[in-house]
Image (cartoon, rainbow, N blue to C red):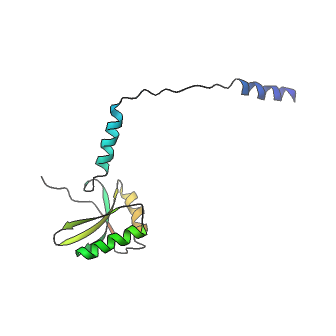
Amino acid sequence: MSIICFIISSAHSFAQEGKVIINQDKNIAALLDSKKRTNKNIDNPTRYKIQIYSGNRSGSQNAQKEFRNSFTVWNPTIKYESPNFKTWVGNFRTRLEADRALKKVKTKFPNAFIFKPKKKRS
């Protein structure tokens, strides 16, 4: 029994402590900020969105307001594509991420669907 106590106490007494110093280029923070701005781009054609409404302006604004009251995770935006106003939600990287969100959104907006915004022509 005393041997077990000796082993446990000696293992504990040889524990090590140390400091970790990270040397990081100052440009990394600027790059991360730039990436965040790029990722938040509403019309990023590589991202998926969910459309919850298409129609007149007041209907689109009502859908936006109702969505904000029901869901706080995603920010709804209104886009005008002649002749309709469209209310879009999210900026999802993968189809799977968008599908999971759509399942939740459809509880309140049963006609919602996933799409990728068209690329703007220069």
Q: In which quarter of the image is residue 62?
A: bottom left
Residue 113 x, y percent position in the rendering: 33, 68
Q: Which residue is drawn at 21% across and 59% down?
A: 118
Q: How many marks?
A: 0
**Residue 21 versus residue 112: which sits nearer the camera?**
21
Residue 52 horizontal side relative to residue 122, left or right = right
97 over 106 or under it: above or below: above
Q: Which residue is drawn at 27% across and 56% down?
A: 42
Residue 120 horizontal side relative to residue 36, left or right = left
Q: In which quarter of the image is the N terminus?
A: top right
Residue 103 x, y percent position in the rendering: 42, 67
Q: Which residue is drawn at 37% across and 75% down?
A: 110
48 over 9 or under it: above or below: below
Residue 83 horizontal side relative to residue 5, left or right = left
Q: In which quarter of the image is residue 12?
A: top right
Residue 108 x, y percent position in the rendering: 41, 74
Q: Which residue lies furthest to the right in this view?
A: 1
117 over 106 or under it: above or below: above
Q: Which residue lies furthest to the left in this view?
A: 122
Q: Residue at x 77, y 29 (%)?
A: 8
**Residue 91 versus residue 80: which sits nearer the camera?**
80
Residue 6 x, y percent position in the rendering: 81, 25
